[in-house]
Image (cartoon, helix red, strand yellow):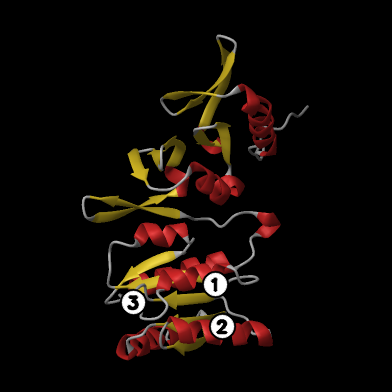
């Protein structure tokens, strides 16, 4: 059961959001705050009293303390709650990703989208077995006024392009404004490994490792990617370990 805080400077919108959240059986308790400043004060008191807070549903543009400023302050808390943005503005989805929000909802909030956001929040707030990462993660990509959500599991590899990263997926390539180092920190526990200073690869999409002209290269889909010398040992060990850890199919074990 989740304990959440709803934050909005517009009272009708705040009351509606709190009402919808309280209808969800996965939500144990909903606290409300009118604006970012009040929310921050309330959260400081919660931390001081040891009260658990699993998630914060917050608006983007609020007077005094906006949603992203509040999000950065929340990130400095010990065991910070996960974030879900609820806003009328479509152009801030990438910023939401940068502060590691689990979802980004547009007003007026649809009940089905709110239910999905709660599901993602529940998944992110629950400890994963044996230290495994959450099952899902997405990156919002702006495409001609539209926002497309690229799922982590569809990304084969990512390459640095100046201040951007190009995500190569099973159905195309997408350019997002972020650093490769930030993406590596976020996805390292999900099987993404650095193979070159400008390339991050999903180990699950690697079909072959071989030597080509004295250099190690990986086959990832239709692409052949070079592995830098400084990363060669780490990449080989990681891929071999991943292969060894795969479950043996039923009936594949040797017998008499």
Distance Cα–Cα, label 3 vs label 1: 26 Å
Residue 29 in the image: state x and y as whole percent.
Answer: 53, 87
- Name the image quarter holding residue 241: top right
Residue beneath label 2, please? 43
Residue 94 in the image: state x and y as whole percent.
Answer: 37, 57
Residue beneath label 1, please? 74
**Frontmost residue, 198 versus 208:** 198
Residue at point 54%, 87% (across, down): 42
Residue 10 in the image: state x and y as whole percent.
Answer: 32, 86
Q: Is residue 86 visible?
A: yes
Please tell me the numbered disc located at residue 218.
none
Q: Is residue 186 left or right of residue 146?
A: right
Q: Is residue 183 left or right of residue 233?
A: left
Residue at point 43%, 48% (across, down): 178
- Specify which label sits upstream in the sequence, 1 or 2: 2
Residue beneath label 3, please? 111
- Name the image quarter holding residue 134: bottom right
Depth-wise, is mark 3 or mark 1 nearer the camera? 1
């Amino acid at each position: 059961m989740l304990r959440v805080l709803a934050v909005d400077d517009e009272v009708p919108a705040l009351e509606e959001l709190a009402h919808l959240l309280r209808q969800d059986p996965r939500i144990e308790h909903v606290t409300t705050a009118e604006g970012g400043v009040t929310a921050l004060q309330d959260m400081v008191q919660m931390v001081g009293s040891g009260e658990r807070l699993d998630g914060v549903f917050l608006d983007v543009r609020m007077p005094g303390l906006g949603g992203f400023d509040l999000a950065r302050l929340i990130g400095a808390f010990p065991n910070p709650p996960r974030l879900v943005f609820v806003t009328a503005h479509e152009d801030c989805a990438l910023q939401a990703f940068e502060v590691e929000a689990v979802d980004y909802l547009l007003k007026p909030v649809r009940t089905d989208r709110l239910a999905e956001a709660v599901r993602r929040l529940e998944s992110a707030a629950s400890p994963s077995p044996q230290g495994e990462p959450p099952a899902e993660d997405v990156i919002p990509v702006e495409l001609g006024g539209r926002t497309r959500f690229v799922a982590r599991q569809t990304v084969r590899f990512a390459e640095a392009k100046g201040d951007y990263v190009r995500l190569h997926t099973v159905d195309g390539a997408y350019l997002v404004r972020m650093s490769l180092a930030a993406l590596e920190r976020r996805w390292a526990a999900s099987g993404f490994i650095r193979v070159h200073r400008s390339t991050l690869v999903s180990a699950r999409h690697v079909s072959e490792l071989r030597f080509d002209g004295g250099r190690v290269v990986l086959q990832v889909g239709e692409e052949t990617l070079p592995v830098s010398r400084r990363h060669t040992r780490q990449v080989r060990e990681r891929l071999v370990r991943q292969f060894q850890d795969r479950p043996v199919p039923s009936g594949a074990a040797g017998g008499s």
